[in-house]
Amino acid sequence: MQPVEHASSSWALPGREKGTVPENRGENIGSHDLAIDVDGRELAAGWIDDTPETRSAIDDALANRVEAAVDVAAAAIDRPVDPGLIHGDVWRTNLLASDGQLVAFLDPACYYADPEIELAYADWTGAFGEAFFDRYDEVRGIDPGFFERRRFVYRLYPLLVHVHLFGGSYESELVETLQRIHGMDDRT
């Protein structure tokens, strides 16, 4: 087995047709309730503290930009969603392939959510190339607006986590993502 090469033109799960993924048949969810409306605000607010022991990499000005982006972000993803089981931490080192077949997901943080959350994370981390997204779109479909808008919204939460855990090296990506989200605001 070897780490996944993101140039692969198709993917197959063991015992399944290429490109198929088991799907949850549960109720629709409002995706903004899952990742942005609650967690985004709490995450930003929870990391702003005046005690040196708990001070975050997110300063007051950046926290204010995150807070301002939450409503815009929620509006951009406010649509009914059929949730799917997602890995939750897809990036190259958490995927193993053998002979062009995806054979294992490592270190899962699984939960049911809008599958676009996983696509946005994979896009952000560079886990897969364009061929993966083309194949995914053929099999399951990618709704219009994902690449233009929603991938940046779904990138916000993991970026906040990464800035908090790993510091300023992710801050410029967070600022760029916030700029893209603020640019979606139809009120401006």
Image: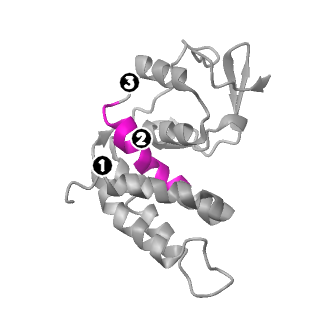
- Pointers 1 and 2 in contact (C-beta within 8 Å): no
- The local secondary structure at tag 2 comes to loop
Write down the residue under mark 3. 141
Classed neighbour count for the residue bearing mark 1: other residues with Cα under 10 Å, few (<14), some (14–19), many (≥20): many
The residues colored magenta run 143-158
Q: Residue at x 72, y 22 (%)?
A: 97
Classed neighbour count for the residue bearing mark 2: other residues with Cα under 10 Å, few (<14), some (14–19), many (≥20): many
Q: Residue at x 57, y 15 (%)?
A: 10
**Which callout, 1 or 2, points at the residue further toward the start of the chain?**
1
Q: Which mark is residue 114?
A: 2
Question: Dividing the image into 4 quarters, which one contains the N terminus?
Answer: top right
Write down the residue under mark 1. 76
Of the two numbered discs 2 and 3 in the rendering, the one whose residue sits closer to the viewer: 3
Give the amino acid type for the residue marked by disc 2 in the picture: Asp
Q: Quadrant of residue 127?
A: top right
Magenta stretch mostly in which secondary structure? helix
Classed neighbour count for the residue bearing mark 3: other residues with Cα under 10 Å, few (<14), some (14–19), many (≥20): few
- Pointers 2 and 3 in contact (C-beta within 8 Å): no
Give the amino acid type for the residue marked by disc 1 in the picture: Ala
Q: Is residue 150 magenta?
A: yes
Disc 1/disc 2 C-alpha distance (Å): 13 Å
